[in-house]
Amino acid sequence: MNRNRGKLQVIEDDMTDVPENHKTTDNYAGSDGIKTLIKELEGEINRLHRFSVRGIQAVALFLIVSTLAWLDFSFLPATESVTSYLGDPPSARIISVVLLFYTFSAIILSLSRMATGIEHKSSFSHVAYLTAFFLFYHFGRSLQENYWAVFGAGITILVIESYRIWTYCAEGISRKKEDLEYAKRTGRAPIAE
Amino acid sequence: MFTTLAGKALVPVGLAVTGFMVVCCLILYSVIREDLHHAEIIHATNLADTVLKSARYAMHKSDRETLSTIIRNVGEQRGVDHVRIFNKKGIVVFSANPEEINRQVDKKAEGCVVCHKGTVPVTTLGTMQQSRTFRNQQGMDVMAITAPIYNEPDCSSAACHVHIASQRVLGTLDIGLSRTELEKSLSMLRIQMIIFTILSLILTIGGVTAILWRSILLPVQKLRIYAESAEDDDFIREPPPHLSHDLDIIASNLYKVKKSDADRK
């Protein structure tokens, strides 16, 4: 594929001297402009590198929360004192129905973002929602029976999100590297696609 | 794997379908288990009521022999772990197991502590609160119901052995049912769900793979081979047949470019 792209680029170079997707802009005219562009592209590549591990960080955080849930949130105040203050939690069945809807919606949302290539930093908010499910089950005294359902939902959603973020970043990094290479080689700025 | 077209198409679908099906099965299993447990409690409560109603006449007449026969016969029933009646002081007065008779029960023991938590014992409990599950000495899971034997007007006014009217609870019937059959059913359900999930996953992933392979991956492979062969300047051949519409346009355009390039030369 890269070979074909190289071949096509050579043909286009022959015809117009500048590839179609690498037309220059006036914003980065001059050697200072190109230096700024190179710095910006390098910064963007670094940012994407950092962003690509966000999904893994969210999975790690969720595993910590799951471990605490496995230990029955021993550091939290007693269930009776919390329920006497906040009232009775919803029944386990209602929480399970909400969990099912949440899992379905989160997967659909993540797949839609994957399809449209949107950069969305939603991983940590999912960890918060899943922690809330753990807490609801805990205060409803049914965490033991429903632990694996929340754990399975969390792992599914966060792994899909991690994959989405990782592929998004991998594509972005490869595109930016191409732009960087072009800018360094020709001394001109490519137009964003 | 992740960089190929097949990997990029199949990994998210596989993850989403697998994860969602596993979560659905776990929630469904949890709901079914809760329902079965609920039904088991209702069944045990009804059984306790039946025993109490059967023994009521014998209690009324203070017929200890008939009462102990009823308790022993119920205790011999398959699936019944234990049946015992405590008096107000917590001493076992009737039991299917003769060794338990006249033993004192600790009020802090599981099943007793629910009512005897405070200084004044609770005299009324809901059906679900009367139940408890534990593992007996033989390592068998047991679900037990503690049903209070209430003082009724004909008990406090009977001539034989009068209880004072202010005494609300006369004793307690404790009946335990083995959970072996229920656990066996749940275990079968678990296996069936795992098999169902695996089969559904194989069908889903297999179906998606087959459709992708037939409609996208195979034509793309053909196009790639054609594009690679088109690199050879001396050889221009017609685009491969039976490509899908979009890929056919790409192949035709590539053919036109190559042909015009060759004509120009």
Image: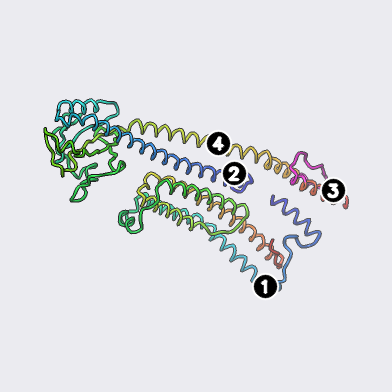
Distance from Cα at disc 2 to Cα at disc 4: 13 Å
- Report how far apart the C-alphas of labels 3 and 4 lie in the structure: 46 Å
Identify which amino acid the numbered label 1 is placed on: Gly
Whether label 4 touches label 1, CB < 8 Å: no
State the extent of the magenta-drawn residues as a range.
B229-248
Mark 2 neighbour density, 10 Å: few (under 14) some (14–19) many (20 or more): some
Q: CA distance from mark 1 to mark 3?
A: 41 Å
Task: Identify residue for label 1.
Answer: A33
- Which comes before the other along the chain, label 2 or label 3? 2
Q: CA distance from mark 2 to mark 3?
A: 37 Å
State the residue position of label 3: B259
Work out which quarter of the rendered image holds the N terminus of chain B and state it: top right
Residue B141 appears in the figure: no
Disc 3 marks a residue whose amino acid type is Lys
Chain letter of the residue beneath label 4 in the structure image? B
Cβ–Cβ under 8 Å for marks 2 and 4: no
Q: Nearer the viewer, residue B90 or A102?
A: B90
Predominant SS of the magenta segment? loop
- Of the residues under marks 2 and 4, which one precedes in the sequence? 2
Relative depth, front residue between B29 and B5: B29
- Name the amino acid type tagged 4: Ile
The amino acid type of the residue labelled 2 equals Leu
The residue identified by callout 4 is B202
